[in-house]
Image (tube, rainbow, N blue to C red):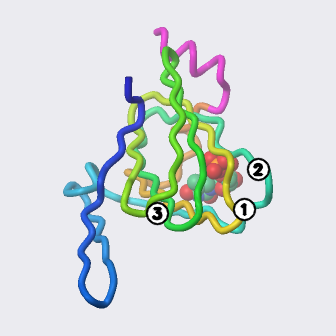
Amino acid sequence: MNIGKLINLKVIGDQRGNLISLESNKNIPFAINRVYYIFDNLPNVERGFHAHISLKQVAICMSGSCTFLLDNGLDKETIVLNDRTKGLLIEGLVWREMKDFSKDAVLVVLASDFYDESDYIRDYSEFKKRVNS
Ligand code: TYD
């Protein structure tokens, strides 16, 4: 079962190199309200450890690599992101953890909404309770 969905981003290439365009409600399946990126990663750092109530996100590893662990409360999935032509769509109630960031990893995240701490579930037992309710 796929918890996260990999989106193949169309590469527009010519003799000068490559270009990818990200558009709200087109190749990105929601209106993009926020973009943030994670970089300058220190060794063995793990991030995330939360779920979102309603936020949708697409994560693209623009350089280097990192690993996502996704958990919908029933199944778990590990996805390595190391290809800037693929976006990982995470929507619905999904616990996510990120690890194995290469030093040069630049992880760009497109989000459907502004930063709002009240949309976060940061406690795993609360996440499990919500999944089961
Ligand atoms: P955090 O949720 O710990 O990041 P991650 O999920 O990658 O482990 O966020 C780190 C800090 O940054 C925290 O204080 C919240 C803040 N933050 C914002 O202010 N805006 C944002 O868009 C995000 C994602 C985080």
- Gap between marks 2 and 3 measured at Cα: 21 Å
Q: Position of residue 38 (x, y in %)?
A: 61, 62
Residue at the location (59% across, 63% down)? 64
* 79 horizontally vs 5: left or right: right
Q: Which residue is the site of mark 2?
A: 45
Secondary structure found at label 3: strand
Where 17 falls versus 89 (above or below)?
below
Q: Is residue 119 magenta?
A: no
Give the magenta-colored segment's residue range.
122-133
Decide: few, some or many residues near mark 2? Use Cα within 10 Å; few <14, some 14-19, many ≥20.
few
Q: Amino acid at mark 1?
A: Asn
Q: Amino acid at mark 3?
A: Val
Query: In the image, is the residue at mark 2 within 8 Å of ligand 1 by its beta carbon?
Result: no
Q: Are marks 2 and 1 in contact (CB under 8 Å)?
A: yes
Depth-wise, is mark 3 or mark 1 nearer the camera?
A: 1
Residue at the location (76% across, 50% down)? 45
Residue at the location (67% across, 55% down)? 101
Residue at the location (49% across, 66% down)? 62
- In the rendered picture of this protein, how many numbered marks are placed on residues? 3
Where 12 falls versus 24 (above or below)?
below
Q: Is residue 132 magenta?
A: yes
Secondary structure found at label 2: loop
Depth-wise, is mark 2 or mark 3 nearer the camera?
A: 2
Mark 2 or 3 closer to N-term? Answer: 3
Q: Which residue is the site of mark 1?
A: 41
- Gap between marks 3 and 1 measured at Cα: 18 Å
